[in-house]
Amino acid sequence: MKNTKGKIKVTLIILLVLLSVFLIFLSALLIRTYTFSAAGNQDRSSFDTVVAGFAANFSKTERTRLLDNLKGALRIPTVNRGATDFDSSSLEEFGNFLPKVFPTVFSSNLVQHEIIANYSHLFTVRGSNDSLQPYMLIAHLDVVPALEEEWDVPPFSAEERDGYLYGRGAMDDKASLMGILQALEFLLKRGYKPCRSFYIGIGHDEEVGGNNGARNIATVLQSRGIKLSFLLDEGSFILSGIVPGLNKNAAIIATSEKGFATISLSVSVDTGHSSMPPKETSIGILAAAVSKLEKNPMPRMFGQGPERGLFEHLSPQLRFPLNMVMANLWLFSPIVSRMMEKKPSTNSLVRTTTAVTEFYAGIKIKAIRVFYAPCPGLITAVSKSRDRKCYKYKLGLCIANTDTRHYLKLTKQLYRFIPMILKQEDLTRIHGVNERISIKNYEEIVEFYFRLLQNSDLSSLPPSHISSCNL
């Protein structure tokens, strides 16, 4: 009897100790959750800011003009299918279109315009202070193909519907391209004279690698000994309703991007009549290989890049218990990683992804032929960069490829961001069906660049983000 009571007493003591340890541990998690400040969080007050000399209060006429100009850009089918498979007449048409809609940019004695590699464009805007290091804004004019029968509207009609402008390139990347030049046009018409010189680069083949456009623009600048204070490209957005537990919009500045490799798998077998097939056909062999590839994804690597900093920065804005999870990724990152891999949109932040994008098989019903399948796969990030002061923005990783990688020798300060609002239903529109942009949001994009051009005239730009945010 005494032994039984003794055992119960010991058990209760052990349970009490375990409960105490658990409560202490839970308290520590909660304290960290509500006092956590991610590395690199800095306040706007930590450096001087500049008040734009010209307010972005566009007139009704200007807002109509900027929308009409974007429509004109979307109606030119600058489709690029490959390094040698593009419509040169459309690219030339776009080149002739720009001076018509931005006459002040092309006539200003502050702006030098050059054609690079036949279809790309380089603008040099001279500032009054040569001691200030220049910066660069880049975009691209080419778009991916669009099948008209899949769209609700013709993909190159630039049709307005319910406050949106539909068209291939509306999101990727003509809104950015036109927004930059439109902002410069409005500023020059107001008498703007920049202190800091800057460049605008517009590539014509980003969708197929940028090896003729952006690469040659970068080569030209490098040959002139140009070093940039920073470069801003496309690559990330303002996320609205996409991050679970976040009631606010989150502007994600991508400070790095994934690289890619394209691998072709092929099988050669003896040809013959399908009435006498071998035990395994070329199609069957390759199908098995592709199936094995898809069933064996690359390992999870969540937390080894800037994506960790992104979620840590967001944690104070999240609802409980997500805020506790994200503020304590040292403990919960394996769980977060497993949850994220369930959705294609977040799985790409967790690991190297692979995707079979093309299949080429037999030539006839009764014939057995060679078969192969190019298999592009995103690999670990190859570009190293650092983020400037983020304010209310968050660090992130660009899961796609941009022209940014061609400018690595010009600056380490590489950022990928467009102030384009991206909702859950918009994720499939990029390179997909019914690509569109909100008319109101496009006006905001022009306003963003209008302010950015002026604010970049700071005599001393903010220092780079701390190294813990680097990839």
Image (cartoon, rainbow, N blue to C red):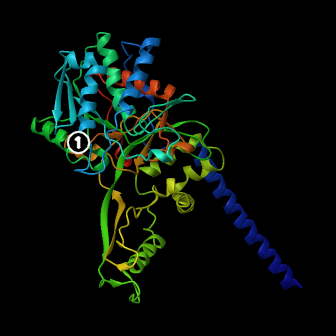
Q: What percent of the width, then of the height, locates residue 359?
A: 38, 66
224 relative to 27, above or below = above
Q: Residue at x 63, y 49 (%)?
A: 30
Q: Residue furthest top?
A: 191
Question: As drawn, is 229 to the left or to the right of 316?
Answer: left
Q: What percent of the width, then of the height, locates residue 401?
A: 34, 49
Count of numbered marks? 1
**Quadrant showing the N terminus:** bottom right
Please indicate, yes or no, whether residue 305 appears anywhere in the rendered image. Answer: yes
Q: Residue at x 16, y 22 (%)?
A: 130
Choose top left, top right, bottom left or bottom right for residue 157: top left
Question: Which one is nearer the viewer's eye here, 134 or 368?
Answer: 368
Q: What percent of the width, then of the height, locates residue 160?
A: 51, 29
Q: What percent of the width, then of the height, locates residue 290?
A: 42, 72
76 relative to 269, above or below = above
Choose top left, top right, bottom left or bottom right for residue 386: top left
Question: As drawn, is 96 to the left or to the right of 244?
Answer: left
Choose top left, top right, bottom left or bottom right for residue 225: top left
379 relative to 216, above or below = below
464 relative to 146, above or below = above
Please indicate, yes or no, whether residue 200 appears anywhere in the rendered image. Answer: no
Under tag 1, what secondary structure? helix
Q: Circle 1 is placed at which residue position?
A: 214
Q: Residue at x 24, y 18 (%)?
A: 195
